[in-house]
Image: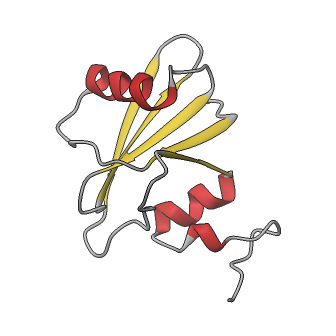
Amino acid sequence: MIRIDQIWLAVQPLDMRAGPDKALARVVQVFGGAHPHHAYLFANRRANRMKVLVHDGIGIWLAARRLNQGHFVWPQGEQTQACLTPEQLQALVLGLPWQRLGANGIIDIL
């Protein structure tokens, strides 16, 4: 089992042709380094593909997810990164508005 203690999202898009070395270089560029038991999320420009790089304390894992319809809810703007909770990650992977997820794990209605 891969242990993940912290989940980080990079706002700027990543070329989905990137392999482990290029994805790791982006992690170093955006987050300052790959820390053990941290996951780093990247999306392509259209936000219909996502890559996750995980440092398990020994090496790195790189996984990809593609949506056949719709897109992931990805932040826009000045920020370069965001920290997510496990509940927010689950919502993000399903294409739900994870930014509105309350502390109780339920989406807040504005």
Q: Measuring 30% from the left and 65% from the top, which residue is drawn there? A: 67
Residue extending furthest top? 58
Residue 107, position in %: x, y?
A: 68, 78
Residue 15 sits in quarter: top left
Residue extending furthest front? 78
Q: Split into 4 quadrants, where in the image is the N terminus?
A: top right
Q: Measuring 60% from the left and 67% from the top, which residue is drawn there? A: 99
Q: Is residue 73 left or right of residue 21?
A: right
Residue extending furthest right? 104
42 relative to 66, above or below = above
Residue 81, position in %: x, y?
A: 51, 45
Q: Nearer the viewer, residue 32 or 62?
A: 32
Q: Measuring 55% from the left and 41% from the top, which residue is drawn there? A: 8
Q: Split into 4 quadrants, where in the image is the C terminus?
A: bottom right
Q: Nearer the viewer, residue 22 or 1?
A: 22
Residue 38, position in %: x, y?
A: 59, 30
Residue 68, position in %: x, y?
A: 25, 69
Q: Measuring 64% from the left and 34% from the top, which residue is drawn there? A: 4
